[in-house]
Image (tube, rainbow, N blue to C red):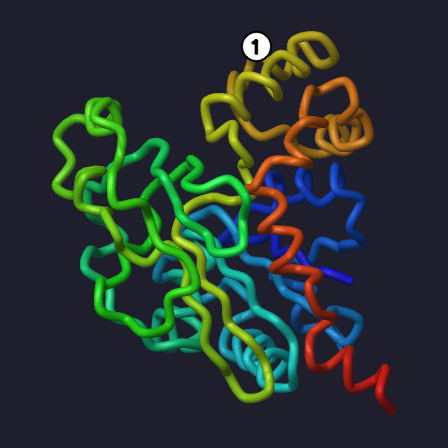
Amino acid sequence: MIGAYDGEYCSSFHVEVALTCMRLPYDVFSDEDILKPGFGEKFSALFFGAGYVSDSPTPLGGAAGRQRIRYLVAEGRDYIGVCAGAYLALYPEPKGLSLARHDLDHPQEGSIFQGFLNVNWPGMSVVPFPVWFQNGPVFCHDTDAAVARFGAAQEDEADRSSRATTFAASDFADRPAALESRFGEGRCVLVSPHLELGSLGIPGFNSLTTAWMQRNCPDECRAHPNRVPMGSSRRRMLDDLGGLGFADQVTRPQWSILRDLLTARLGNAEQGKTDA
């Protein structure tokens, strides 16, 4: 069972779409859930996705909740952090989880390129392939923990989609796109670009979801164009992914990698139960 965080730091909507399409079992957890007795015992992996890591003291249930997440990973579960989820693992307490130590070449608050970047991921039949990048961590070139890197060449047009950036698409050549390290008995995988968005990126994702909202929830769509649906409309959308147009993403390399990261093994904690 995969745990997908949806709280003050990160939103789970995009990965919920991916996991639902791939028919992977998951459960969404909130900041408040982390403090409940027995939290996390059913999870083999914890997914933290898109969002923004602020200085607020309340996310993840405060210090006790952050310690609970650290304990779960140390016990043998996988932590998969994408973009904001990667920042969260890297930042020291009290802001972050301090699950990994990797140097960054650019702050979260800086003006970084947004758009598609080519990624080389070992083991994939299609390389390089485009993945949406939006203000994710910029890992230093010389790290020895890289499991995937951005392509040596990026599209010339890419830089033009984000004018006035201080870190452009061409600056990502050969940089790590994903890192893996150990934390106790667990594994910490940090991914800079957004695998959960498939080959669509934010523009394509918003186009499909907005079209669905216009057909099924026109009043909400008019009030909040391009907004991630909430409440009952969000549940309805996840129940109607066949009508959304995401089906072909299941076979794309971006979601294939995401599936492998979350299911290639059950996680040490779950494996221990199997072996017992």
**Image spot of residue 66 (x, y percent):** 52, 75
Q: As displayed, is residue 119 above or below residue 217? A: below
Please give the residue where the numbered disc 1 appears in the rendered image: 222
**Is 129 left, or right, of 243 in this rendering?**
left
Where the N terminus falls, by quadrant?
A: bottom right
Q: Secondary structure at mark 1?
A: helix
Closer to us: 40 or 30: 40
Question: As displayed, is residue 200 above or below residue 134?
Answer: above
| Kind of residue at disc 1 | Arg
x, y percentage for residue 19? 71, 45
Please tell me how crowded label 1 is: few (under 14), some (14-19), or many (20+) other residues with Cα within 10 Å: few
Given residues 62 and 148, the one toward you in this image is: 148
Q: Residue at x 79, y 23 (%)?
A: 242
Tell which of 126 and 38 is nearer to you. Answer: 126
Q: Which quadrant does the C terminus fall into?
A: bottom right
- On screen, residue 134 above or below 93: above
Q: Is residue 197 left or right of residue 3?
A: left
Count all numbered tags in the image, as a single digit: 1
- Can you give x and y, in whole percent of width and height, for residue 213 in the image? 66, 15
Q: What residue is drawn where x is 77% and y is 76%?
A: 41
